[in-house]
Amino acid sequence: MALLNFRKKEAKPGASNGELEAFLKGYSIEVMPRTAGKVEDFRDLLPAGTRVYIAHIEGTPIEDMVATAKRIKAEGYDVMPHFPARIIKDKATLADWIAQYQGEADVKQGLILAGGVAKPHGDFDSSMQLLETGLFDQAGFTNLHVAGHPEPNLDIDPDGARTNTYAALDWKQEFSKRTDADMALATQFCFEAEPVIAWANELAERGMNLPIHIGIAGPAKLQTMIKFAIACGVGPSLKVLQKRAKDVTKLLLPHEPTEVLSDLAAHKAANPDFNITQVHFFPLGGIKTNANWAIEHGGESTKPVNA
């Protein structure tokens, strides 16, 4: 298949209000059972139908995950639990998790990833091994998302050359042709638009056409941002936070994603074929804070948030 011409237009710095609003349309957000438990009613915070990812951290009982999915689904949202390969013991365990999610919450979407565990708990080491079981297709999953890495992931490619990362993406691209589910790349959070744009364009030039849902850290204190960025291995764009941290007057102020999203929205408006199709929020400063920020910057509103 012939490659498209990827001579991108130069987007003006920052997006208009309409461009940012369009870019935020249909955003998704990530929660954990612990953080979800602090929300009295998601209908006070999120537009109806929002996709809510449920992060599965090592040590979280599957029962807590399923209960969270059931509760959020009942409040009117599409739930997408994580399936981290390295904490799933075997195929029978995976089948049991899928059965529980579907029996309790009618789950038909999943984020399939390796997981941040150094030593696998059982038979699985990668997201590809989970997908290859065929269990998600047998269960009728409609959406299967996999991890994308705009910045080199040193756990996967210690030399930073992306060799293993791109080999995995090639496999996932081919798998997308033999699954009935819609696939997309969901990325780790980023703080700077330029490297994200370069990465997305590079994937397109390599013939990878899976839609990209770009990870964005919601508003949070700068110290919180830096802590999570270091813990999650976010590399080059961490310098954006470190530069801001040198100004002590900004240490206590929240760091907001306005600039990075505005730049990405402007680029998308100038290049409609740009393969980033949605925004995925990591609400590091709290779900309510993130939801309010989205509404204030053009995201779809809901009924007034309770104080």
Image (spheres, helix red, strand yellow):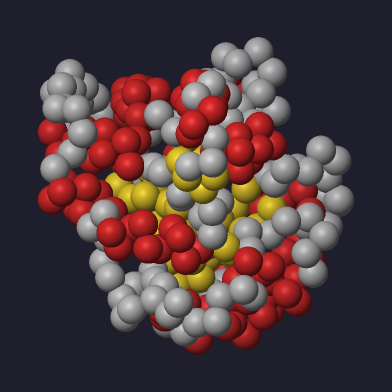
Q: Where on the picture, by quarter, is residue 16?
A: top left
User: Does the rendering let one see residue 110?
Assistant: no
Q: Residue 207 versus residue 252: which sits nearer the camera? A: 252
Give the answer, above or below, for where 170 lies relative to 181.
Answer: above
Q: Is residue 223 left or right of residue 283?
A: right
Q: Residue 211 versus residue 50: which sits nearer the camera? A: 50
Q: Residue at x 54, y 28 (%)?
A: 248
Q: Residue at x 21, y 54 (%)?
A: 21
Q: Quadrant where the C terminus lies?
A: bottom left
User: Does the rendering let one see residue 288?
Assistant: yes
Give the answer, above or below, for where 135 lies relative to 96.
Answer: above
Q: Is residue 60 left or right of residue 221?
A: right
Q: Position of residue 198 (x, y in %)?
A: 35, 22
Q: Where on the picture, by quarter, is residue 206?
A: top left
Q: Residue at x 54, y 35 (%)?
A: 251
Q: Residue 46 versus residue 214: which sits nearer the camera? A: 46
Q: Position of residue 27 (x, y in %)?
A: 35, 58
